[in-house]
Amino acid sequence: MTSFISHTTIDCTDAYALSTWWKDVLGYTDVPDDPNEPGHEECMILDPGSGHRLLFIEVPDPTPGKNKVHFDLRPSDLTQQEEVDRLLEHGAVVSTDHRGIYGEGSGWVTLADPEGNLFCVLRSPAELAGAPRPPADA
């Protein structure tokens, strides 16, 4: 027997606000017949294409320190820089810029969402197709 991941849960202080922020960033929707509303302590959003679900749940004391799990976003129709710019306009903030870490055209940018959760923006598939590969031991 095996298990499967039902959904990914994110502890937060304002489930509605954070789920709305990520819904806009990822192009997710509310779960049919279960719309998220201000004041809800649990808000789930859904990728209409894959069915992947994210559950934002309010907790009295979110885990302090560095996230042990984070999202890596890969832009589907923008460049890495265009996606970073879009997310900054949407309220994200830059935490660390790792672009160029393995040479020109490599790396990622670490951003934080409105509650400080870190996530990374990788290069787009088009950028990857034309970029040099990092060293094998990196």
Image (cartoon, rainbow, N blue to C red):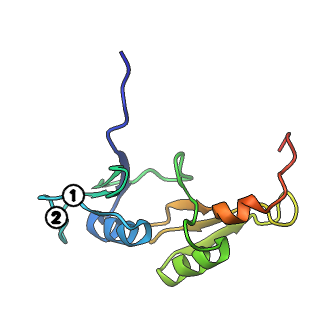
For the C terminus, the quadrant is: top right
Quadrant position of residue 5? top left
Residue sitting farthest toward the left: 33
In the figure, is residue 46 to the left or right of 99? left
Circle 2 is placed at which residue position? 35
Q: Residue sitting at 79 percent across and 61 percent down?
A: 106
Figure quadrant of the N terminus: top left
Quarter of the rendering containing residue 72: bottom right
| Residue at point 83%, 51% (across, down) | 134
Packing grade of label 2 (10 A; few <14, some 14-19, many >=20) is: few
- Do the numbered discs 2 and 1 sit on residues whose CB atoms are within 8 Å? yes
80 relative to 87 in the view: left or right:
right
Residue at (34% x, 44% y) in the render: 7
Circle 1: is it few (<14), some (14-19), or many (20+) Cα within 10 Å? Answer: some
Per the image, label 2 sits on a secondary structure element best described as loop
Q: Is residue 7 visible?
A: yes
Relative depth, front residue between 91 and 3: 3
Q: Is 135 situated above or below 92?
A: above
Farthest residue toward the bottom? 89
**Image coordinates for residue 132, horizontal then vertical, percent:** 84, 57
The answer to whether any part of residue 123 appears in the image is no
Vertical arrangement, residue 11 with respect to residue 93, above or below: above
Task: Give x and y (percent) for residue 48.
Answer: 31, 58
**Marking on residue 70:** none
Three-letter amino acid code at the position of disc 2: Pro
Residue type indicated by callout 1: Val
In front: 34, or 76? 76
Residue that mark 1 sits on: 31
Q: Give the Cα separation between the discs numbered 2 and 1.
A: 6 Å
How far across and how far down the image is residue 130, in percent?
A: 78, 63
- 48 horizontally vs 85: left or right: left
